[in-house]
Image (tube, helix red, strand yellow):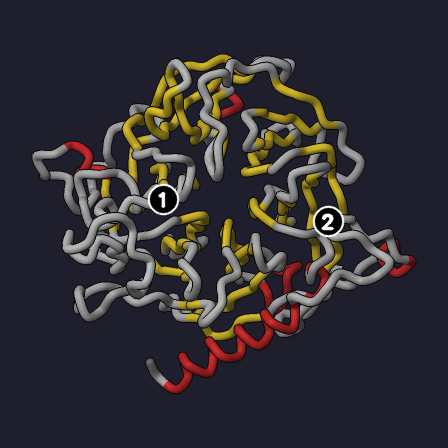
């Protein structure tokens, strides 16, 4: 590791330790801070070199482990909740009304980290009313697999009807390391990050869909035709874009350039942000080449001794973990110096990380906005809205919220 890389890891670790202090005595963890007088003033757009302060507002509450966020053309917002619920918010603005969407989710296996997870709204939603969810699946009470399911939302938003299983057969164990974050690229291809379900042999097995980045057609469910292993005999391998991952929780596609970044949980150290390259191994192998049984988490996240060609992370959390989660990019001149920054939420760390990147995808700097430090508890989803604002969900289990973040 270069001196500069070591310095970045040390700086972020120190910042994380500073941020993980107790919540202020006058505010409960997870409580949205009250409005301040200056928040009502007309904001002055920051210059392109100025890092703006952030305004955090509550759009809606009463959620439970809001896992992902989808924006509809009419301004309404869909949210998947891990205990197998779908909520519809009347708008993306503060004070939105929250209602439940009726959907048959009786087959969702809600256990541990599993349940109703990631979601994407189809680009042609205005015509098709389609959205796709990622969910753990059970039959007769027995866990079966993790699958992508495509739904059609009624015109009044009250009912979602299941259309088809877009992709099945992702591994499922007790609910640990379920991963499953879908994102749509500029080319319309669905990019999916998966977890290894805490099974040691899965990350390096390209015939298994766990511990991978996958690419597939959003409408047919077939592997993307330009995937690196598209000519493989095993169909599962044709979906694989990269492998050797532990538990991908965030997938973000960089505007304009199209680079794919993932946020990934480490064991007791070294959460990672990775820049994904086609066909590459990212070096996680808790089976040690099949030499050990079970799930040996003492191995490095990127094992360069076993896999010299493995791709090192662009950022690691160091000797601690933040339990990094979703990832998205900020876009728009209103963000000033943060325009183009990669946003990563943290569960255990209860914070937001802002990574400024070079054109090549290297991490130039990392900052932790004080507006989030232990004020809202655990943070999960992060999506950039059509209005250019950043939307984040809390995931504390009771009265979780959708937050709207804008430059102040």
To which quarter of the image does residue 132 belong? Answer: top left
Q: Earlier in the sequence, mark 2 or mark 1?
A: 2
* Other-residue count near label 2 (Cα within 10 Å), few / some / many at <14 / 14–19 / ≥20: many
The residue carrying pointer 1 sits among few (fewer than 14), some (14 to 19) or many (20 or more) residues within 10 Å by Cα, namely many
- In the structure shown, which secondary structural element does the residue marked by tag 2 occupy? loop
- Counting from the top left corner in percent of width and height, residue 76 is at 66, 29
Looking at this view, is 98 or 130 the one in front?
Answer: 98
User: Where is 143 relative to 120, above or below?
Assistant: above
**Residue at mark 2 to residue at mark 1: CA–CA distance:** 27 Å
Q: Residue at x 29, y 63 (%)?
A: 299
Q: Among all residues in the image, which is located at the extreme front?
A: 293
Q: Which quadrant of the view contains residue 259?
A: bottom left
Is residue 119 in view from this perspective?
Answer: no
- Is residue 248 something one can see in this rendering? yes
Left or right of 252, for residue 200: left
Q: Position of residue 129 (x, y in %)?
A: 51, 20
The label number, if any, that marks residue 140 in the structure image: none
Q: How far across and how far down the image is residue 308, in percent?
A: 17, 69
Front-most of residues 235 and 384: 235
Q: What number is the disc on residue 195? A: 1
Q: Residue furthest right?
A: 37
Residue found 58% across the figure and 25% down from its top: 85
| Residue drawn at point x = 29 percent, y = 44 percent | 199
Q: Dividing the image into 4 quarters, which one contains the C terminus?
A: bottom right
Q: Which residue is mark 2?
A: 30
Q: Is residue 158 left or right of residue 204?
A: right
Please tell me which residue is depicted at 69% across the width and 67% down the height of the picture: 21
């Amino acid at each position: 590791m270069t001196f500069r890389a070591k310095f970045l890891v040390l700086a972020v670790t120190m910042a994380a330790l500073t941020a993980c202090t107790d919540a202020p005595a006058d505010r409960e963890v997870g409580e949205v801070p009250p409005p301040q007088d200056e928040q009502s003033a007309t904001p002055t757009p920051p210059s392109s070199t100025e890092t703006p302060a952030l305004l955090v507002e509550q759009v809606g509450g009463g959620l439970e482990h809001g896992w992902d966020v989808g924006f509809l053309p009419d301004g309404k917002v869909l949210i998947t909740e891990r205990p197998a619920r779908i909520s519809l918010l009347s708008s993306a603005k503060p004070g939105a009304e929250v209602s439940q969407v009726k959907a048959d989710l009786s087959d969702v296996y809600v256990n541990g980290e599993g349940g109703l997870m990631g979601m994407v709204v189809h680009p042609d939603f205005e015509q098709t009313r389609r959205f796709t969810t990622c969910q753990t699946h059970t039959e007769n009470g027995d866990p079966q697999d993790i699958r992508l399911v495509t739904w059609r939302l009624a015109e009044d938003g009250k009912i979602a009807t299941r259309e088809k299983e877009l992709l099945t057969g992702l591994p499922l164990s007790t609910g640990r390391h379920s991963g499953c974050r879908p994102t749509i690229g500029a080319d319309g291809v669905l990019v999916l990050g998966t977890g290894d379900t805490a099974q040691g042999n899965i990350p390096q097995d390209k015939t298994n869909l766990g511990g991978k980045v996958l690419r597939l057609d959003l409408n047919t469910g077939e592997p993307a035709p330009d995937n690196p292993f598209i000519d493989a005999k095993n169909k599962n391998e044709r979906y694989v874009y990269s492998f050797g991952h532990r538990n991908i929780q965030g997938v973000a596609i960089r505007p304009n350039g199209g680079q794919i970044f993932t946020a990934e949980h480490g064991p007791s150290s070294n959460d990672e942000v990775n820049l994904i390259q086609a066909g590459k191994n990212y070096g996680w192998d808790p089976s040690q080449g099949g030499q050990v049984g079970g799930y040996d988490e003492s191995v490095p996240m990127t094992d360069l001794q076993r896999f010299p060609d493995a791709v090192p992370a662009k950022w690691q959390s160091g000797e601690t973990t933040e339990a990094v989660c979703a990832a998205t990019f900020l876009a728009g001149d209103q963000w000033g110096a943060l325009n183009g920054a990669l946003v990563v939420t943290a569960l255990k760390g209860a914070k937001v990380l802002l990574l400024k990147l070079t054109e090549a995808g290297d991490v130039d700097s990392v900052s932790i906005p004080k507006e989030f430090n232990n004020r809202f508890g655990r943070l999960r989803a992060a999506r950039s809205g059509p209005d250019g604002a950043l939307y984040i969900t809390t995931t504390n289990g009771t009265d979780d919220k959708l937050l709207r973040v804008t430059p102040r």
